[in-house]
Image (cartoon, rainbow, N blue to C red):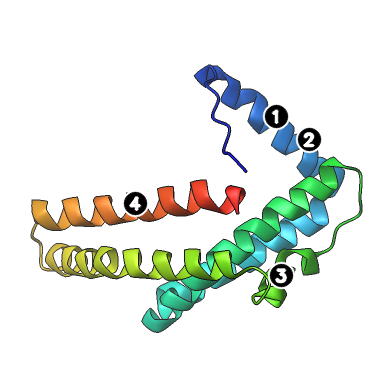
Amino acid sequence: MQLAVSRVNSLRAFSWIKSGWRLFTQQPAPFMAIAGILMAIQLLASLVPLASYVAVFLLPFLTIGLYQVASKVEQGEQVSVNDLFHYLSRIREYRVLFRISLVSILLSIPASMAGSNMAEAMIGGLPPALDQLVIFVLFMGLNFMATAFSIPAA
């Protein structure tokens, strides 16, 4: 399988938002429940440092589950919140998602260390160090690109 790349006008993003809203209004309850679950995971990850790595590990599985939910709604099928966890329950079949999760965790480690150092500096009333900011942005960007482009292809 080869990844097809196409160039589109940046204003096309508005049509994507419109399409997303149309999908949401077709079955709002599952999408709201899924958003609540994802927010709860993020809240837990922000409160418990070790949980953040668990959240990073789960993210590719939950992201592709959300893609699956949107695809089913687009095809006129009924969806449930359980569809979000479809790929998580089949880790052995989707080892590529497991590998993406591990890469995401590895990229998150230097980003979280830099973010922690910046937070400590700001609490102390100091501006964040430029090198810490560069490391944070670089590794967060790499992590986002790695997951955003590899998950749909997986």
Quarter of the figure that contains the N terminus: top right
What kind of element bears circle 3? helix
- Residue 142: which disc? 4
* Residue 128 seen from this side: no
Residue 64 location (% of width, % of height) = 65, 57
* Residue type highlighted by circle 4: Leu
Which of 109/30 is in front?
109
Label 2 vs label 4, nearer the camera: 4
Q: CA distance from mark 4 to mark 1?
A: 28 Å
For residue 118, above or below residue 133: below
Q: Quadrant of residue 41?
A: bottom right
Q: Is residue 38 left or right of residue 25?
A: left
Residue 63 location (% of width, % of height) = 61, 58
Quarter of the figure that contains the C terminus: bottom right
Q: Is residue 69 left or right of residue 145?
A: right
- Marks 4 and 3: in contact by CB < 8 Å? no
Which of the two discs, 3 and 4, labels the residue nearer the N terminus?
A: 3
- Marks 2 and 1: in contact by CB < 8 Å? yes
* Residue type highlighted by circle 3: Phe
* Residue 136 seen from this side: yes
- The residue shown at (77%, 54%) is 69
> Which residue bears the numbered disc 1?
18
